[in-house]
Image (tube, coloured by chain):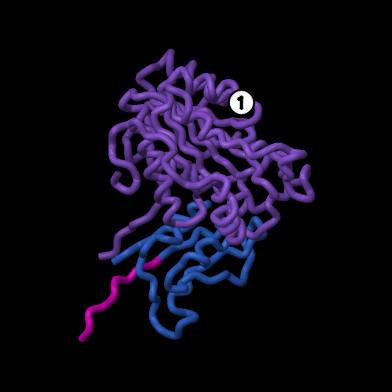
Chain colours: A purple, B blue
Amino acid sequence: MEKKVFERPRYLKKASTHYCPGCGHSILHRLVAEVIEELGIGERTIGVPPAGCAVLAYDYIDVDMGEAPHGRGAALATGIKRVLPDRIVFSYQGDGDIAAIGTAETIHAANRGERITVIFVNNGCYGMTGGQMAPTTVTGQLSTTTPGGRVPLRDGYPVDLSEMLAVAKGTVYIERTSVTSPKNILRTKRAITKAFRTQIDGLGFSLVEVLSPCPTNWKLSPVEAARWAEETMTKTYPLKVIKDLTGTPGQDGN
Amino acid sequence: MTKKAKKGRITVDREFCKGCYLCISVCPTGSIGISGTLNQKGYYPVEFLDGKNQGEESRCTGCTTCAIVCPDVAIEVYRE
C-alpha cells in the first residue's frame, strides 16, 4: 500500500512564491508552517513579517499576521504579546531589517526578556534592493556597494547580532543554523520547534538565526550559493547553540 | 528470491518548480532529471525519471531528501 510521506504543510498556502529559484526564504516559510502545524498552535499564532524580500510572508504562511515597519518587528511583536499574552507571537526578520535599522528595538526587546520568538534570516546582503552591503556581509564578500569585496578598515567588520543578544540577560534560547543542506534544514526545524516551545513555556526571548543563500545577489547558481554559504559564511557565523537556558536537551542530546 | 528494496515515487508540480535543481544535487539515487519543456514561468522544471535513464525500474526509495530541500514545495513523496 502506497502512502504519502511528504506533502505541503497545512499552514502554507497553495501559492507559488515570488522568491527567486533556490531562495532560503521559501524553505524557511515551509519549516515555520510545519512547526506551527506540529505544535498545534495555528489558531493562536500571530506572525510579524519584515520589510525586505519576506514582506509578503502573509501571502504564504496561513496564520494571522501584522506587518511591521522596517526593523520594528520585535517592537510590534512585544505590543501584540503584551496585549494578547495567550498568543504565540513570532517576528520574521532579515539581516538588514534586524541588524541595521532595527538594532535598537531588537536589543531592547531581548534585554527586557519579551516572551517572543524571532526568526532571523541572514543572507549577508540587502536582497530586495539589489544586493548592497549589509552589516552582516562577511569580510571579502562582493556586493554592489563593495564591488572589490568588503574591507574591514573601510567598511567595518561583520556584525554578529546573535552573539550580541546572547549577552543580554533576558534572552533564553539563541541558536544559529542554516538551510543549505538537508541535514541543516532538519536542524533548523528542530531549532525553530525549540524556540516556539521556549515561548509556549513562557521562559523568555528566543531567537533562531538562519544562514540563507541568496543566489541572485551573490551571482551564483542555487547549488553553488548553498555551498558558498556552507563553506564561507560559516567561518564568520559558525553554526551552533549560542545560548540555551531552557534546561531541555539540545540538538545533540546535551 | 531476494527481498525487494523499499520503493518510492515522487510527483513534481511543474508550475511550482523554478528550476533551482537543488533536488538533483541531493538525490542519492539519481532519480531526478531536467524536463525538456518549459513551464509557464519560463523555467525548465525537474521531472521524476522513473528508471528512464537507468534502463531498469526506478531506484527511488522515497527518502524525501529532495522534498526537504525543495524551496517551492513542488515535490510530493510517496512510499510503499
Say which residue appears at 38% left-offset and 17% top-offset.
Answer: A85
Residue farthest to the left, as pictured: B1
Note whether B10 is above or below A101 in the view shown.
Answer: below
- Does the magenta stretch mainly form a helix, a strand or a loop? loop
Q: Which residues are magenta?
A: B1-9
> What is the quadrant of residue A182 in the picture?
bottom left
Q: Residues within 10 Å of mark 1 (few under 14, many from 20)?
A: many
**Chain for numbered disc 1:** A
Viewer-proximal residue among A37 and A150: A150
Q: Which of the 4 quarters of the picture holds residue B6? A: bottom left
Q: In the rendering, at what x and y percent does residue A64 appear?
A: 46, 28
Q: Residue furthest front?
A: A153
Residue A43 among magenta residues: no
Q: Position of residue A88 (x, y in %)?
A: 39, 26
Q: Nearer the viewer, residue B44 or A195?
A: A195
Q: Secondary structure at mark 1?
A: loop
Position of residue A130 in the picture relative to residue A8 (left or right): right
